[in-house]
Image: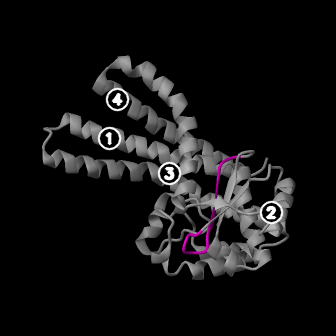
Amino acid sequence: MRHLGLKARMAIVGSILFAFYAVAAVVLMAMFGEGLLPLILVGSVAFVGVQYKVGKWMALRSVGAEDLSEDRHPEIHRRVESLSRSMGIEKPRLMIARMGVPNAFAVGRKGAGTVVVSEELLARLEPKEVEGVLAHELAHIRNRDVVMMVLGQGVASIVAIVAQWAVLLTGDNDIADFFVAIIVGQITQMLVMLFVFAISRYREYVADSDAADEIGGGEPLARALEKISRGNERRDESAVDSQVNALCIFGEERGLARLFATHPPIEKRIERLRG
């Protein structure tokens, strides 16, 4: 079975996210009564579809992504079509955005995926290196881990909002409760996202490995990651927000921020690709 470790981690984290969501539902019923149960059940079903659609749309909109012209970039379209056929997925929609830094990300699932590359990435990387990046993003779509990331972010937001309202409705409705609610919401959201981050780091290693298998070796992707890392040294120029950054091929954090990083250290990824 392909990537049993990734699937097992996704199943465990999915169960944990469901548990957080269930706790939020119980809190809502405690605050507003059991008559809210039918609404919660219907909302739970609708949430999955809506969050998937909205999360995908917001990710693309946040970077101003536009369709990658097949007339101007025929070779990229040909390579993605060939890689998609080899990987057993439909060719995804290809888009381009000005992100300020070389980067790329994928959203969606098999049959409805989208890959976005930055103008800066195409300008900096050689064709074989671009192919490695594209194979990496296609691997995310094939492995369905992008869906888990988007849904995880949605569950974290909902649980945080419920926690904030619980503080506000059980307090004295003064200014102190307002600030406490904000703090509790932030802590709750971070707690939920810790489980999503654990999958995020692992899925990058898996996608790197898949890409190396598809393009016949890890060296082109390793060189691409080196160039992307150098291009991201001036992160103040980046137009990518924190939620989309979690989906990108590069999102390294340094120092204590590594505890909450969505990506493993770039040097370790390069070492594995060359090993």
Residue type beneath disc 4: Leu
| Residue at mark 2 | 77
| Residue at mark 4 | 28
Query: Closest to the observer: 63 or 13?
Result: 63
What is the magenta range? 98-109
- Determine contact: label 4, label 3, CB under 8 Å: no
Residue type beneath disc 3: Phe
Mainly helix, strand or loop, the magenta region? loop
- Determine contact: label 4, label 1, CB under 8 Å: no
Identify the disc placed on residue 195.
3
**Which structural element holds mark 3?**
helix
| Residue at mark 1 | 163
Looking at the image, is mark 4 or mark 1 earlier in the sequence?
A: 4
Is 101 included in the stretch rendered in magenta? Answer: yes
**Which structural element holds mark 2?**
helix
**Which structural element holds mark 1?**
helix
Can you give x and y, in whole percent of width and height, for residue 7 in the image?
67, 47
- Determine contact: label 3, label 2, CB under 8 Å: no
Residue type beneath disc 2: His
Looking at the image, is mark 1 or mark 3 earlier in the sequence?
A: 1
Is residue 8 something that shows in the picture? yes
Task: For marks 4 and 3, give the one nearer the viewer.
Answer: 4
